[in-house]
Image (tube, rainbow, N blue to C red):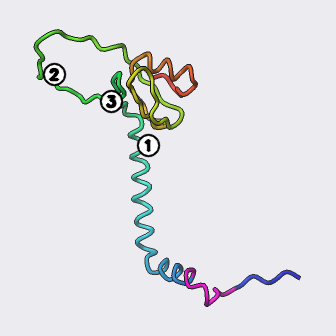
Amino acid sequence: MPANPRTKRNPKDHTGNKKSILAEQHAEEVAKRKDEIAMHQADQKASLDEPIALDEKGRTIQSVSEETAVDGPVEIPPETVNIRIACDLEKVTIGQGTDFEFKEGQVYTVPLYVAQHLDRLGYVWQWL
């Protein structure tokens, strides 16, 4: 005959008893915190659609104001494309001395050859 389940907590279960006491004491705070976490997750999902521009070395490109003029020859940057990555990739080496870091679902602006290489390997989820 199977044993009946306990209806009361075991008095020797100090961890379980303490957990239930703390849960009752902080129920209001936990409920408020759940809303904050939900809003934070929504903000994170919204930020995935903002493209992150990467240069040929895998570094994030900082936006430069047009007021900053540079004397000397002007270098034409390589053609860039926007892609969305299908999975997290860490320290991906594409070319000599380049390391790229990619986060799943994030939109990236990368040189065309990087996007083509990742697409050949099946890591590009979407071309934008």
- For label 3, the residue is 59
Residue toward you, 98 or 10:
98
- For label 1, the residue is 45
The amino acid type found where label 3 is placed reads Arg
Q: Residue furthest right?
A: 1
Q: Looking at the image, tell me whether mark 3 or mark 1 is earlier in sequence order.
A: 1
User: Magenta part of the protein: which range?
Assistant: 7-16
The residue positioned 41% from the left and 64% from the top of the image is 33
Image quadrant occupied by the N terminus: bottom right
Q: Does residue 71 sit above or below 58 in this rendering?
A: above
Q: Does residue 113 sit above or below 88 in this rendering?
A: above
Q: Looking at the image, tell me whether mark 2 or mark 3 is earlier in sequence order.
A: 3
Q: Does residue 96 sit above or below 91 in this rendering?
A: above
Which quadrant holds residue 114? top left
Check if residue 75 falls in the magenta segment: no
Q: CA distance from mark 3 to mark 1?
A: 22 Å
Q: Looking at the image, tell me whether mark 2 or mark 1 is earlier in sequence order.
A: 1
Which quadrant holds residue 123? top right
The residue positioned 38% from the left and 40% from the top of the image is 47
Instruction: Provide residue 112's location: percent of width, then percent of height.
Output: 42, 16
